[in-house]
Every structure is written in C-alpha cells, then in structure tokens.
Amino acid sequence: MCLPLILVIVGLIVYPAFYSIHLSMLNKAQTRFIGLGNFRFLLSRDTFWMVVEQSAIFALSAVFFKAIIGLITAHLINNLPTKGQRKWRGMLLVPWVIPLALSSLAWWWLFDPTLSAFNWVLTGLGLRAIPWLSDPYWARFSVILVNVWYGAPFFLIMYLAALKSVPEQLYEAAAIDGANAWQRFVHITLPMMRNIIAITVLFSLIVTFANFDIVQILTGGGPRNMTHVFATYAFLLGIRSGDLPLGAATSLFMFPILAIAAIFILRGVRKRGREIG
Amino acid sequence: MASSRLSRRSVLKTAVLGSAAAITSPYVSGVHAAGSLSLGVWDHWVPGANKALVKLCNEFGEKNKVDVHIDFITSQGEKDKLTAAAEAQAGTGHDIMSHRDWNIRIHQEQLEPLDDVVGGLIKKYGPISPVAEYLAKIKGTWRGVPTTVGSQVKPCCSRIDLYQQHAGIDVREMFPPDEAKWDKAKVDGWTWEAYVAAAQKLYKAGYPVGLPLGQSSDAVDWVGGLFNAYGVVMVDAKDNIRINSDETRQAMEIARKLVEVMPPDVFAWDDAGNNRWLISGKGSGIMNPPSAWAVAKRDNPKVAENCWTHPVPKGPKGRFVGQLPMFYGIWKFSKNKTAAKELLTYISQKEAVAQLVEASVGYDLPSFKTMYDLPTWKNVEPPPGTVYNYPPRGDEQTSITGAPARSEVGAQIYNQAINTVMISKFTQGKEKLDEVIKWAEKELEGTLRA
C-alpha cells in the first residue's frame, strides 16, 4: 500500500536531494570527486559572504513585514461582520494566487529604470524620481517590497484561521475581568496563535530564503551583485557560468541554515503542544 | 587472378593514414543521410526569422529523406541554457542544440567533434571569426559550428540628427555605406576621447548616450570593447592576473567620464534597456545590434529614420567591438550524427546564410568575413545604408570579455560581469580606483579555480 508513496518520495525528494549533494562534491567538469572543495572555495569568497548577508536581510526583513501585515489585516478582516468577510479575503488573496513570475514582471514595469510608472507619478507631483532598481539600496528595498506584497496574504489566511479557532468564551471572560483590547490581544490572542505563527514563519522563511523569481526578474542580482540571494547566485554560477557543482554547493548552503531554524521552531511548537495537552 | 598480400605493417599504415585523412579532411556529404533529426534552436526575436531556418531545414529534409523536427527555445530567462544543461545531464534530447556564447565550452565533453564540418567551411569561406574560434575550438577541436542565426556584434547605433546638431559630428559622412569612401583621417579621429567629448555635448543638449552598466551581455560587451581598446588584460592565457595596470586606469577614467554624462539608470538596464532608451527618443546613441533600430522602425519610425550603425571608437590598442557568436552543437548521444553534420553544412553555405540574414533584417551575422558582402546590409532602410556598417569593417576587430584567458576562466569573468561591476563600484559606489582593482584581483583569483 505504501509503495506508491515510497516511490514518489524516493523519486521526487530523496534522489534529487542526494544527487544535488553528490553534484556539489564534484569538480567543475563533473569528472572528479573533490569532497567539500566547492564549499571551502565559496567560504573564501567575499562575494559569497555578501550573498549570505543579503539572503539573510532579504528573508528576515521580508518575513517580519509579512508577519506584521498579515497579523494586522487578519485582525481587520476578523472584526468585520461574517457576511462581508469573504470578498475581502478574496481580494487580499489576489497577490498570492497570481503566478509570481507574472506579478514580478508587472512590478518591474512599475519600477522600470527608464519608464517607471511610479516615477511618472512622483515627478508629476513635483517630487524627485526614485532609482528603484539602479541604486543598490533602493533595489534591495524594491525586491523586499515585492516579496512582502506577494507573501503577506499567506500569513493573512493562516492567521485568520488561527483567530477563528480562538474560543469566544476566553474573550468574554477577559472582558468581564476588565481587560482592554491590547491586553486581550497580548494575553489571549497571541498565546493561542503562537504555534500557527511559528509554523507560518518557518514555512515562509523556507520559501523566502529559496526565492528566485523576484530578484531574477527585477534586478538579476545587480547592481554590483548587491541584491543576489542564494538561488540567483546559484543560478549565475551553475547555469550561466556553467559550474553546476559550485551552483549546487551554493544552493545547499541554505539547507543547514533552514534546518537549524526548523529544529528550533518545531521544538517550540512541540513543547507548546505538550503544555496544552 | 591478381592478389595482394596484406602485411600487419601495411594494414597499420593504411589505418593511420585513413584516420589522419578522416580527421583533417573537410566533411563530405553522403548522398542520403536519412532517418530523423531533432533540433533545439534559439527562438529568434525578429518576427519571421524562424521561418527562414524552417524553410532551409525542410529543403534539406526533402532532399535527403530526413524527417527534421525543430523546437524553438527562447533565451528569455535562460531557458535555452537550462534545456541544454538538462539534456547534457540526462544524456538524451535533441540531436542538434544551439548554444549561446560560452555554452560550447560548458558542454564540451558531451559534444561531438565537428572539425570536419567547420574545417570544410573554413576551406571554402576563409578565416573564421577569432571570437568564434576562441569559444568553440577547445583543445584544438571544434565542438560547435558557428551559426548565422543569433550571432551578433555590438557597434554604435547613433542618432544622425542629434550627433550632427549637438556634437557637430556627421556619422553618415564619417562612415558612409561604402568602405572605399571612408575618410581615413575622420575614421582615425573616432576615438574613445572623441566619443566622450561628443557624449558630453549630447548630455548638455538633453540627449545623453546610453550604455548599460548592469550585469547582462550588452553591458559586458561594450565595456569589453573599451578595455581591449586600451589594452586591458584581466587574466592572460597563462593564468596571470594582469588587471592592476596603467591600461586599466586609463580605461576606467574614460568610463568615469562617460558615466557622468549618461542617465543614472544605466546600472539597472538589462539587454533591452539601451534599446528602450534609443527608441524613446531621449537617447542619442547606444551600442547594439540593429535590433533597437528594427523595433524603432515599428514603434517610433522618426527615430529609426535617424539611426546610423557604425564602428565603435578606437583606443591606443585598436578598435574593438564586442561579439557574441552562437553555435550549433551535436550531442554525443545523437542517434543520427551523419544527418546532423550534413544539415549543419547545408545551412552554413553562403546561399543559405543569405536567406537567414535577409529574414533577420541584417541582425544575424555570419562568422566569415567573406560573407559580409551580402546585399541585405546595403539594402535595408530607412535610411538607406543604415546597417551597412553593422558587420565589422575597416580596422574594427571583434572581441569578447574574458579572452585571452583560458575559456573556462573567461566564462567566469564574462558571466560574473567583473568589468562592469568594477565601473559601477568606481563610479556609482564612489570606491577608490585602487580598492576597485584590488577587489577585481580577488574576484579574478576566484575565476582561476576553473
């Protein structure tokens, strides 16, 4: 009975994972086993460390803002009458359901260095045009902004589900005890949502760390390599420069970082689960 | 009955002579290749250009009883490179695959030697582009046949009216559509210093030139031409890092002056950025194949009527234009190598090349100088003769960033856009030149790992 499942797991997860590990330990021509040579090489490169730093800035700041925006909008929707909630939920989910490559292209048109729609509005209002993609720091801001726009609805929907599962009696009891809205949020809502928040953050962290489309379409890693993240840098090394093993090694660097994050977050989730149980 | 005795020595001698002849002689077509052939080919951006290739392949198929199937694969998002990488890893796929820039080197181990095909073409059409040779002749063996389709150089494309009005330069008079009429003094005076001086005037007039400084090929190619014109060698053929030189400092100074008079967005431009700049009417000049002019012809005809393609400026070491050839390779796992070689030979003949160049409105550039007399470049308009100077003529030489380093090293230098990042750091990043050169040395040291 489990055979089809085992075949799927082996074929689509175990084999590709081990193959990429194997690939990362080969020389450039893929003719010789070089152990951890590719990893050692990467660790000795300044540009790679810049990519590590940028990936961390990109993922952590994007996840932080997605979580905040998701939490606020989930509350706003939860406070609406049940009848009107569906259309708001539907509208706010739109960024998440549009294919990312397509929406990134639309954003690129808005940021376009020569014909930016945003800059057209800004200059029309008498303000200065913003170098959205040509200045490295604005470019970093832009890629994070698009990621937040795309990913916030995921947080929204998860948080909304969590909010709906908080028993109403807890809020009633708190109200009788004289708790204000902030106290109800801090002492009831947040503790009840902690597991969902943790799991959502973990999922989003994994997806954001591995993000490729947004950076590739908006900046291609530039200017001055200052927006590269692991996936785009791995693509540059592996596909564009033809060094597949080095590209594989670059992308595998994400694995220990995410594994450690996953261990801590899931341990917290289990611990809280046991406490509740 | 006459009989001949075969000794071991004579058999060996015959075998050796036969092998040598097979290796060195040009490819001789069989009568009927037969079977089927599949091609994974770069999807041309010029509307209708793919049809010329389809027509040629169908003609070949009918003549030789070969069932030819073509898949056009876009280079958007590097899909063609991804497909090639996947086929190389899987050991299965098309028989013939088109490979851009450095991909022949990348897949050299999986590609069939094509000395017979290319050797035959060289014998017939004379010397081949040195850039094509650098990219596809690996360890003395041709692993790819330079294609006409998609191969390009990136000369100047300037606005006739704006240059004349604001910089006092008549680009048409300097480079008329007949090499014999070129005035040597004027041509020699078209230097990088003259280019900067013109760019400064055009900037003041509100029509800056626009040369990209991102990390895509248009940017890497023009900077490569500038560096070569000043004799900058990043890494030599013996793996010596030579970026710390007076030549580098001179070239960087020219780049600095240029950046001051170009739109600040050049650092974010992709390969279409300069095209858009010219087509918008805001720009007075770019360095690009005639694609920008061709799109302007459709979208902004007034701009197109004033475009003139002509050689790039020269520097102390010569006049170098960036070239990006494309190649066809036959996978070693192909089941019909004979037919594949015959097809490649067929579509590389001058008569076939003429059709391909015509269909691409002059964008596609063969790797043989003897084919630069095709009528398309003379006939295309408006204005008449606008792309006559697209094929490198006069003292213009082709070059590619990364050369003369080993091609494995060159590929890293090119794809990591080390030269454009140097300029961005120096100008936009306001880093000291010595610091930038030190950074480049470290990056180049990393490329030597290859």
Image (cartoon, coloured by chain):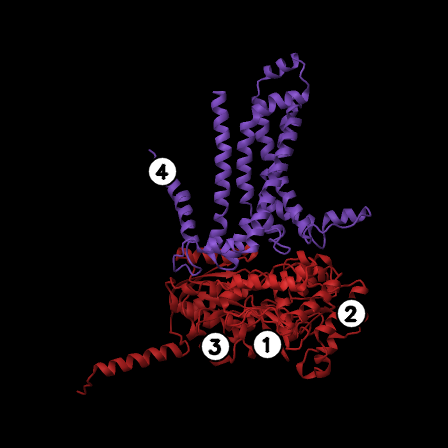
Chain colours: A purple, B red
For the residues marked 4 and 3, what is the alpha-carbon distance in whole angstroms?
Answer: 54 Å
Q: Amino acid at mark 1?
A: Leu
User: On the rendered structure, is B373 left or right of B255?
Assistant: left
Q: A226 or B288, which is in the foreground? A: A226
Q: A126 or B45, which is in the foreground? A: A126
The chain containing the residue under callout 3 comes to B
The local secondary structure at tag 1 comes to loop
Q: Residue at x 49, y 59 (%)?
A: A242
Q: Amino acid at mark 2?
A: Asp
Q: Amino acid at mark 3?
A: Leu
Q: Against B282, is A158 above or below?
A: above
The local secondary structure at tag 2 comes to helix
* Callouts 2 and 3 in the same chain: yes
Q: Are marks 4 and 1 in contact (CB under 8 Å)?
A: no
For the residues marked 2 and 4, what is the alpha-carbon distance in whole angstroms?
Answer: 70 Å
Q: Against A222, is A75 above or below?
A: above
For the residues marked 4 and 1, what is the alpha-carbon distance in whole angstroms?
Answer: 61 Å
Q: B245 or A81, which is in the foreground? A: B245
Q: Against B406, is B92 above or below?
A: above
For the residues marked 2 and 3, what is the alpha-carbon distance in whole angstroms?
Answer: 42 Å
The local secondary structure at tag 3 comes to helix
Res B139 seen here = yes
Indicate which disc, 3 or 1, sits on the residue closer to the N terminus. 3
According to the image, label 2 marks what residue? B161
Closer to viewer: mark 2 or mark 4: 4
* Callouts 4 and 3 in the same chain: no
According to the image, label 3 marks what residue? B121
* Callouts 4 and 1 in the same chain: no
Closer to viewer: mark 1 or mark 2: 2
* Callouts 3 and 1 in the same chain: yes
Residue B374's tag is 1
The chain containing the residue under callout 1 comes to B
